[in-house]
Image (cartoon, rainbow, N blue to C red):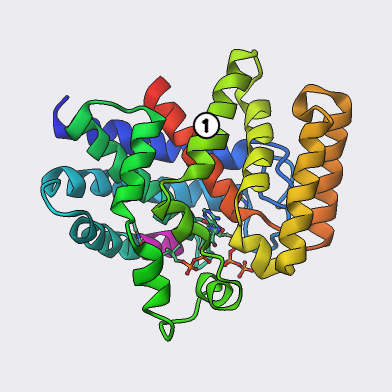
Amino acid sequence: MINTEICTKISKAAVKALLYEVNVSPKPGLVDRFNTGAHKDMDIFTFIESALALEGYFYDCCRITLENHELDFPDLFRLLKKRGIAADGEMFRATSGVNTHKGAIFSLGLMSSAAAMAHVNDSDFSYVNICKYAGLLSESLVKRDLDEKKAAEMTHGREIYNRYHISGIRGEAEAGFPTIRDHSYPFLLNLLKDGMTLNDASVNVLMKIIMNTDDTNLISRGGLDGLEFAKFSAGNVLRAGGMSTEEGIKEVQEMDRTFIKRNLSPGGSADLLAVTLMIHFINNG
Ligand SMILES: CC(C)(COP(=O)(O)OP(=O)(O)OC[C@H]1O[C@@H](n2cnc3c(N)ncnc32)[C@H](O[C@H]2O[C@H](COP(=O)(O)OP(=O)(O)OP(=O)(O)O)[C@@H](O)[C@H]2O)[C@@H]1O)[C@@H](O)C(=O)NCCC(=O)NCCS
Ligand SMILES: Nc1ncnc2[nH]cnc12
């Protein structure tokens, strides 16, 4: 395939993943078709506007990668980061200043580049290969972005790293997205093979993600107790059968009510669900 076709295929998979993610329901504490979770400043339409505004950015992540794939990874990442910061502005303009997808701009932008790299180097869109390139592109990101920039502009992520040494999205990326590679994507494949709908499988996958990642949104909203409570609740849902049993569905609904009451929103986990869906759409249309 020529470059424009590859960039179109990947960028459309990224937008489709963001649109599917916000529509998957019920998602405890998050915006979905039933409610706005623990959020008063955004709803499903804010996410739709945001996702549609980002298609050009995802296309550019692929284009920049294909045009510069001879560069070493840190230099290529610097070009992508510059485009990503511009995309943050495009998101804020589309949402009138609400942070819907700041993390998703990072994760799905990185995945768009990694998928383009997987194509041009190996013609292989397997999830393992895409995760491998995402990790290579993010090499030493924690060191460069957190260890060496202690005094940089304070963000939730930097605050949590300085306090707990939890690296959040940067650590996930630098390690090659192990939550996707070892947990969410294989789990999604198995659930779909068992005949689950994509919506119900995605709810179960979100539980699996919450159990296996240190979501800094949960920490910034509920501290380490909030993170541990979320992991325990997600495990309870899957132990009760998830979306395949009445008991499991009751557990998810109860988890949503509790997260809203405790102002807990696993936004980082929702982004990893979107990444999981993006890889699924790249491989299955
Ligand atoms: C690299 C950045 C992400 C740096 O941003 P920051 O220093 O802020 O890092 P974090 O806070 O650690 O994470 C930022 C967002 O990443 C998502 N996230 C969190 N944990 C994880 C995880 N373990 N794995 C993957 N992703 C994770 C999460 O984003 C989602 O949640 C946000 C919405 O939730 P909400 O609670 O409403 O957020 P706030 O508005 O902050 O809270 P309130 O004020 O409402 O209470 C939304 O962003 C979702 O996407 C974290 O929020 C990156 O920003 C950066 O530097 N970008 C520059 C461009 C760039 O590097 N591009 C590279 C392209 S290849
Ligand atoms: N559906 C969602 N609700 C709240 N925050 C999110 N961040 C990413 N997806 C989200």
Kindly tell me whether mark 1's CB lies below 8 Å from ligand 1: no
Residue 63 position (above or below residue 198): below
Q: Write down the quadrant of residue 131 in the picture.
A: top left
The magenta stretch spans residue 242:
no
Query: How far from the left and from the top, in percent, is residue 44?
Result: 61, 47
Along the viewing direction, whichever of 173 and 32 lies nearer the viewer? 173
Q: Kindly state the secondary structure of the residue where label 1 is placed.
A: helix
* Residue 55 visible, this angle: no
Q: Residue at x 59, y 42 (%)?
A: 22
Residue at the extreme bottom: 151
In the foreground, 234 or 38: 234
Residue indicated by mark 1: 185
Check disc 1 and give the amino acid type. Answer: Tyr
Percent coordinates x, y for residue 110 in the rendering: 35, 49
Look at the image and give the residue range highlighted in magenta.
87-94
The secondary structure making up most of the magenta span is helix
In the rendered structure, the answer to whether residue 32 lies left or right of residue 57 reads right
Q: Residue at x 56, y 66 (%)?
A: 166
Q: Is residue 214 left or right of residue 79?
A: right
| 251 lies left or right of 219 | right
Residue 237, image x, y percentages: 80, 37
Query: Which residue is at the front of the view, 116 or 57?
Result: 116
Q: Residue at left 47%, top 41%?
A: 275
Classify residue 146 as left or right of residue 73: right
